[in-house]
């Protein structure tokens, strides 16, 4: 079935469910959407599992429960539905002609399984990370540019306070902690999502996170002609950046493209897990640490740490005195579905002695905030050694954690069009790579319509212009030029 059009506006979608949600949300008969999330009344649990959730305050804005299991703010639902369409892109117009399929690149090997057959021992050494004797006990990350520290509008006041406290100041540790406790206050749904007051997530979801995504073991031939065992985790995809590099090279509308280290995995949420995007973005940051063998990589042997592992790491950092206000503001996150953001990501990385730097941006009278973000990200790439006179600059830089109200993503690149306009390239944890993208991983190809396959990864003025503040978190460790790409 082809796309169906909304009778009230130009929106169209091939999924009748998304189309119905669009109509009910944006064109309701009585002025109120009928798809307001059931999460405020009861948990969405599988048949046979009934666990009620108590609502302690009225929602600050209506949420819509998407069929993917995520509660989406009504104002963002149309974009969310359109990205689901891009996620499923696999039509004849999107297909690419594969002109060469080399042996599996080294970057696609699983760290846990890149050894001889029969030695499958994937592990996550979280206790080692928590108890490492080399861990610093204070948050000493660099300050961002002074002009862009504050997020000073509406419901973002609390977010500004959290970030400013985490960034620290030139006062003693004792005074800083005292200030944190004086200023910290419990946050609500505007910052922590629809489960802001949850004490414990449903047992079925806890079990799902403990089991993790499905793991498949396959045999592949390496560049050296050796048989290796490859671990494929259902919600982790390696090799996407090498596909994006070829697509950007073939898009004639682009003048310049910057990409981060190719070892960054696209990690996305499992079915029905809800709003764990912050944790999935941290996992993508850690996938870089593992692939680039940058500072802290020895703390994460084997598979990526799970959502529950990351919760333990953040709670442990709070207990050891790092950004203690975070625990006051969230009420604790262990075993819950509360949203986390930039302060929690920085708390975790700082506790593991992985250098990072946070920056915050807000609208001004003179310039849209998204233009400030473009400038910051472009300068981030330009400041690194990059090959001269190349259209697609393949760097060894880490991705950037990227937060806006209600959602976070991972920035993996930036595009500059011939027209002068720019947009971010992101891995969005709410969406998995499309079948068209997955088919091209590890291959050389020519795409008939590269812009269609790139659509799911682009975030431009229209998307970013809906938000008036952003937070970004970058890693400070840098490795040699081209590291990672020369292995592809």
Image (cartoon, rainbow, N blue to C red):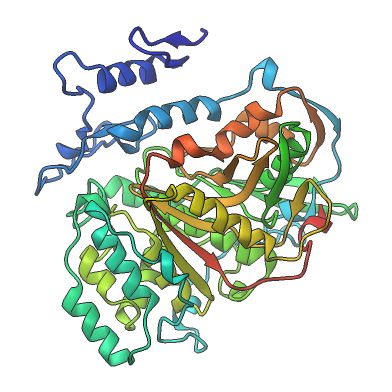
Which of 162/440 is in front? 162
| Whether residue 315 can be seen here | no
Q: Is residue 19 left or right of residue 97?
A: left
Q: Is residue 297 above or below residue 341?
A: below
Point 30% across, 16% down: residue: 23
Question: Front-most of 404 and 295?
Answer: 404
Residue 314 position (above or below residue 410): below
Residue sticking out furthest to the front:
366
- Where is residue 34 shown, x and y percent of the image? 19, 22
Which residue lies at the image location 78% right of the left edge and 33% below the top edge?
250
Q: Position of residue 447 (x, y in %)?
A: 76, 27
Residue 186 pos. (x, y %): 17, 64
- Residue located 76% across and 31% down the image: 252
Rendering quarter of residue 440? top right
- In the rendered structure, the answer to whether residue 451 lies left or right of residue 270 reads right
Query: Does residue 278 show up?
Result: yes
Residue 223: x and y in percent read: 87, 52
Foreground residue, 291 or 48? 291
């Amino acid at each position: 079935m082809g796309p169906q059009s909304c009778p009230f506006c130009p929106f169209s979608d091939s999924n009748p469910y998304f189309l119905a949600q669009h109509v009910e949300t944006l064109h309701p008969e009585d002025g109120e959407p009928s798809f307001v999330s059931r999460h405020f009344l009861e948990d969405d649990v599988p048949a046979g599992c009934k666990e009620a959730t108590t609502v302690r305050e009225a929602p600050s804005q209506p949420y819509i429960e998407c069929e993917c299991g995520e509660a989406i703010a009504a104002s963002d639902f149309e974009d969310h539905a359109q990205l689901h369409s891009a996620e499923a892109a696999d039509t004849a117009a999107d297909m690419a002609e594969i002109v060469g399929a080399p042996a599996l690149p080294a970057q696609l090997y699983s760290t846990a399984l890149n050894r001889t057959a029969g030695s499958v021992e994937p592990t996550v050494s979280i206790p080692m990370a928590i108890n490492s004797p080399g861990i610093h006990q204070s948050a000493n990350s660099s300050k961002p540019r002074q002009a862009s520290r504050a997020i000073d509008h509406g419901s973002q006041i609390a977010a500004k306070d959290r970030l400013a406290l985490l960034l620290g100041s030139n006062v003693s540790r004792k005074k800083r902690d005292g200030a944190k406790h004086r200023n910290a206050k419990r946050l609500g749904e505007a910052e922590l999502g629809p489960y802001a007051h949850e004490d414990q997530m449903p047992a079925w979801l806890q079990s799902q996170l403990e089991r993790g995504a499905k793991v498949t073991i396959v045999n592949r031939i390496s560049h050296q002609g050796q048989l290796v065992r490859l671990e494929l985790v259902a919600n982790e995809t390696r090799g996407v950046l090498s596909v994006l590099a070829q697509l950007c090279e073939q898009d004639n509308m682009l003048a310049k493209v910057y990409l981060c280290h190719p070892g960054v995995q696209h990690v996305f949420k499992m079915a029905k897990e809800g709003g764990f995007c912050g944790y999935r973005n941290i996992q993508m940051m850690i996938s870089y640490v593992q692939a680039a063998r940058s500072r802290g990589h020895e703390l994460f042997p084997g598979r990526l740490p799970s959502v529950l592992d990351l919760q333990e790491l953040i709670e442990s950092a709070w207990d050891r005195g790092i950004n203690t206000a975070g625990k006051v503001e969230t009420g604790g996150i262990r075993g819950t579905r509360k949203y986390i953001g930039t302060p929690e990501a920085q708390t975790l990385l700082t506790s593991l002695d992985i250098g990072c730097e946070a920056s915050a941006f807000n609208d001004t009278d003179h310039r849209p905030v998204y233009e400030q973000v473009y400038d910051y990200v472009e300068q981030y790439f330009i400041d690194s050694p990059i090959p001269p006179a190349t259209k697609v600059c393949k760097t060894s830089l880490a991705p950037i954690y990227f937060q806006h109200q209600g959602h976070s993503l991972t920035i993996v690149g930036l595009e500059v069009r011939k027209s002068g306009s720019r947009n971010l390239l992101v891995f969005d944890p709410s969406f998995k790579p499309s079948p068209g993208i997955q088919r091209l991983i590890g291959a050389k190809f020519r795409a008939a319509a590269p812009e269609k396959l790139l659509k799911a990864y682009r975030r431009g003025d229209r998307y970013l212009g809906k938000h008036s503040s952003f937070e970004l978190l970058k890693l400070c460790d840098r490795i040699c030029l081209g590291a990672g790409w020369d292995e592809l």
